[in-house]
Image: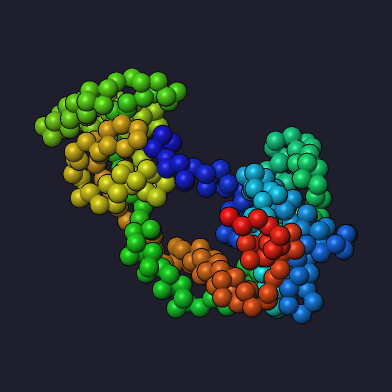
Amino acid sequence: MLLINKRYARRLALGLIALVLAMTVLGGCAKKGSKTAVATYKDGGKVTQAEFDKYIGATKFFYPMYAQYEGDPAFEEHMVKQLVAFRLLGARADEAAKKDAGTKTKDQMTQIKDYFNQQGKDALKTQLKELKVTEKDLEDYVLQSLTVLSSAELKVTDDQMKASYEEKVKNKELEITTVSHILVMLQDETGKDIRKKEDALKRAQEVKDKLDKGGDFAALAKEYSDDPGSKDNGGKYEDADPNQWVDNFKNAALNLPLNKISDPIETEYGYHVMRVDARKTKTFDELKVELKSVVAESQITDFMEKELPSYDIKYLKATPTPSETPSASPAK
């Protein structure tokens, strides 16, 4: 889709992650191996090198971009805290949460295998080998994560979900729109300039003038629009989430009066002449499952921000702060 917001595009690229975990924070799994501690915490808790290596490997399976931060003490300390948090929260889960997580884990592992089988017979095995984790490591990782999420979700109340829903409605996060637009681009999809900015604006204004005089939107879209994703469909995007679009286009989709032809709207792609054909808000009943996860995730985040610090987690590989630096260090 040409108009897609780049941040939203990254989320789409991580669709498998959302499918598997539907979470913003991931947990780790304890494994046998080296007993060398990389972190300690209250009541004799510790994270061994082997456990941490498995955790990082499994995390990179879902978030490959994390590889660029590997070896960064600040990043690794953050990941250690996530691992400990999920270990602690997982230990609090009741049998209902564990059973629910077990069922979901089997389903998610099947989806992961199906996805990689489409890439090739040994695609999953190759990926796991590169990350130095096994399929069982991955399954344990997903199970631990989903146990924590299921435990949190089982505690979510209808009142909490309704409060979350009302906040999202207030912020216009739940709108679904049908829009028609004609895009006059400055550059083609390869980045090559195709017209000057003033020429693009002039062409967009010409389109608006024709529409204001009763011109057929679909016919003009086919003649003028540079958007290959919509020009042959009357310029229309139907029942779409505006949050996926670049900011100016999104704001217009959310705020333009219905069935009104807009003035040319500038985005990073060029100028759009736009009409909002329909707009509706997703209902509470449609979003119950999603809202439960949203509230559960916020509770997990609250634990990490408010309670986790009391466990006095010490990352033993962390770079010393200035106050911890030996006194022999030269003064600045």
Q: State the residue at coordinates (62%, 62%).
A: 322
Q: Position of residue 316 (x, y in %)?
A: 75, 63
Q: The C terminus lies in which quarter of the figure?
A: bottom right
Q: Position of residue 320 (x, y in %)?
A: 68, 61
Q: State the residue at coordinates (56%, 71%).
A: 305
Reply above or below: 97 against 3.
Answer: below
Identify the colour scheme used: rainbow
Horizontal relation, residue 81 to residue 264: left or right: right
Q: Position of residue 230 (x, y in %)?
A: 36, 32
Residue 102 visible? no
Between residue 226 and residue 233, name the one nearer to us.
Answer: 226
Q: State the residue at coordinates (29%, 52%).
A: 254
Between residue 56 and residue 295, name the one nearer to us.
Answer: 56
Residue 303 visible? yes
Q: State the residue at coordinates (47%, 46%).
A: 8
Q: Position of residue 216 (x, y in %)?
A: 20, 30
Quarter residue 130 falls in: top right
Horizontal relation, residue 41 to residue 217: left or right: right
Between residue 122 and residue 188, name the one nearer to us.
Answer: 188
